[in-house]
Amino acid sequence: MDNRPIGVFDSGLGGLTVVKAIKKLLPNESILYFGDTARLPYGVKSKKLVIEYSNQIVKFLIKKNAKMIIVACNTATAMALEELKYNFKDTPIIGVIEPGSIQASLDSINKKIGVIGTAATIKSRAYNYALKAIDNNINVFSKDCPLFVPFVEEGMVEGEAINLIVAHYLSSFKNNIDTIILGCTHYPLLEPVIKKYVKDIKLVDSASAVAKHANMILDECKIKNGYKKRGSLDCFVTDLPRQFEKLGRNFLGESINEPQLVDDF
């Protein structure tokens, strides 16, 4: 039995969709969530900076006794995951790209899969590599949607403005695909409005796939919490804790305690 918490991080609030999935599948596990709200979005940052930020955050979470790290950010997964695994060999570290890709490959019938994400995630071609590694016959169609994250962070997930932006990004993005990966942890909050434009296309939200993968790794490493008590959630942010508390409910689906502000780590 290992009652140490799982560390989860993202550039902002989006990773709370992963926390929600973990809490549902593994209710006994405690979670430390780190939202780097002062430096978001990561999607427009250089690889060097994203690696630097990710290293700082993982070091912080491990100091807080995290037994496992989930990189709940597609950009950080694409740019920093391998470096993090190398730098913190004693701690299991997983990202969001591989689990989401596996799920999409299982869901797709015609092997034509779309990926939407930040500019950095799309430019990295991380989903292309992951999907091709699973099945070389998969055709991948990618589209960066840079305005989605700021709209979600502002809580503007419905209304005329976001409808126009979704239409702008997705109207030309059909290509007979039957599955789209929501390649950013913020995007599940836009699922209803995205669904309007892609109707019969299956949407893959990697959060539940990540939770299943985390469950498997906890078992493999024999670090699952066997206690029956419900796990806790402690949040840390680098800016605007009250805004995080307010908007965090939208991502988590329940109220959230005010996070601790971290400005020196």
Image (cartoon, rainbow, N blue to C red):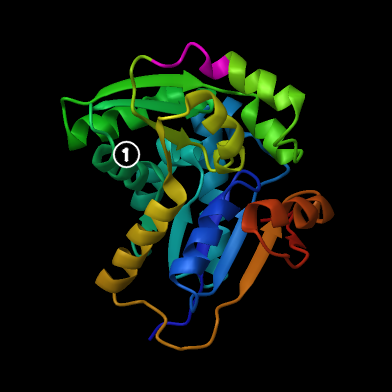
Under tag 1, what secondary structure?
helix
Q: Residue furthest front?
A: 200
User: Which is more toward the observer, 31 or 194?
Assistant: 194
Magenta-highlighted residues? 169-174
Residue 211 screen position, x and y as percent: 41, 59
Residue 119 screen position, x and y as percent: 52, 22
- In this rendering, the count of numbered labels is 1
**Residue at position x 72%, y 65% in the image:** 256
Question: In the visual, does 49 lie left or right of 138?
Answer: right
**Residue at position x 53%, y 32% in the image:** 195
Pointer 1 residue: 104
Q: Amino acid at mark 1?
A: Ala
**Residue at position x 42%, y 81% in the image:** 225
Q: Mostly what secondary structure, the magenta segment? A: loop
User: Which is more toward the observer, 258 or 192?
Assistant: 192
Q: Residue furthest top?
A: 172
Residue 219 screen position, x and y as percent: 29, 73
Residue 88 showing in the rendered view: no
User: Which is more toward the observer, 219 or 179?
Assistant: 179
Question: Can you say which quadrant of the picture contains the N terminus?
Answer: bottom left
Is 5 included in the stretch rendered in magenta? no
